[in-house]
Image: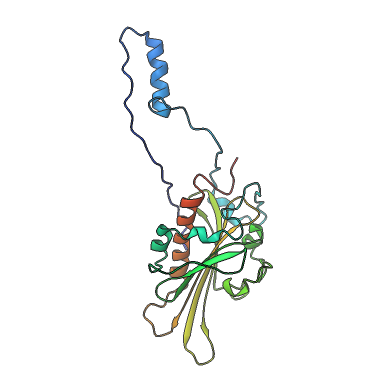
Amino acid sequence: MAKTGTGSRERGSSATCPAFSPRILAPALIAIGTVLAVGGCGSSSPTGPRTETLTPNSLQDTALQFRTNRAPVFAAGAECAAFTPRLYEIADVPQGIRATTMVPGHGCWAEGAQGNVVSVMTTATPFGKFWRRDYPDDDGSGITATMVDKDYAQSFDRFLIDGRYYAVRVGSRWVAGLDSGTTKTACMLVVDTGSPQPLLVNLTQQVSKSDPAVRTVPRQCTAAETVARTILDEHDPGGGSRVS
């Protein structure tokens, strides 16, 4: 699967620049022009945390070390905040469907269209475990059924989101039950946000194998990535795996 990126959004404001007399000394005009060029009329240069740009070469480094100096995107138990009107639209969750807590203090889910279930979690498993594909079946919160088993996954991919976040996506598709003919397609996507508790998005579809809406693993992982990008855009602006 291709490694892709997305841009961040910024809000601009308009203002009227003050007029200056031509009798003002040229050096002053040069200094003012420099300030305006950098920060806009009357504004100062932005300050605050800086996010390191990541390189694709690092995707092959299994010994990569990950920072743990940031708070999680969602505190454990607050994941239902992810389900904003924008996420409902992106995840194709019908209006009127309410996001529901999965396990008290752990995650949140909502049922979307075409047999999909969208889950958002704050997992206690360090991101490095996902990176090296040795994550446990359960992080201790009872979420085994919502994760893709590492031993039976049909796809495993490390990639970057917006050149700022390390991420891993793991996908699988199987037939549920002996004679049911039900097809399950799942993609687990984990994002390193610089926190000890990574952001985990899981999309699982369960439909009849003859249903034309049945998804492939790549398509399910693309949808999971779109969900993750939306969450990061709305809840972690300016964030990343390495923020200083």
The image quarter in which residue 18 lies: top left
Total numbered labels: 0
Residue 241 placement, left or right of 38: right
Type of colouring: rainbow
Residue at 42 percent of width and 65 percent of height? 91
Relative to 111, say whether 127 is above or below: above
The image position of residue 241, as x and y in percent, is 58, 49
- In the displayed structure image, the side of residue 228 where residue 68 appears, left or right: right
Q: Nearer the viewer, residue 74 or 130?
A: 74
- Tell me the quarter of the image containing the C terminus: top right
Q: Residue at x 57, y 72 (%)?
A: 146
- Lateral position of residue 24 relative to residue 228, left or right: left
Residue 39: x %, y % from top left: 42, 28
Report x, y in % for residue 65: 67, 51
Residue 206: image location, x then y, percent: 47, 79
Q: Is residue 147 above or below residue 235?
A: below
Residue closest to the eye, 80 or 126: 80
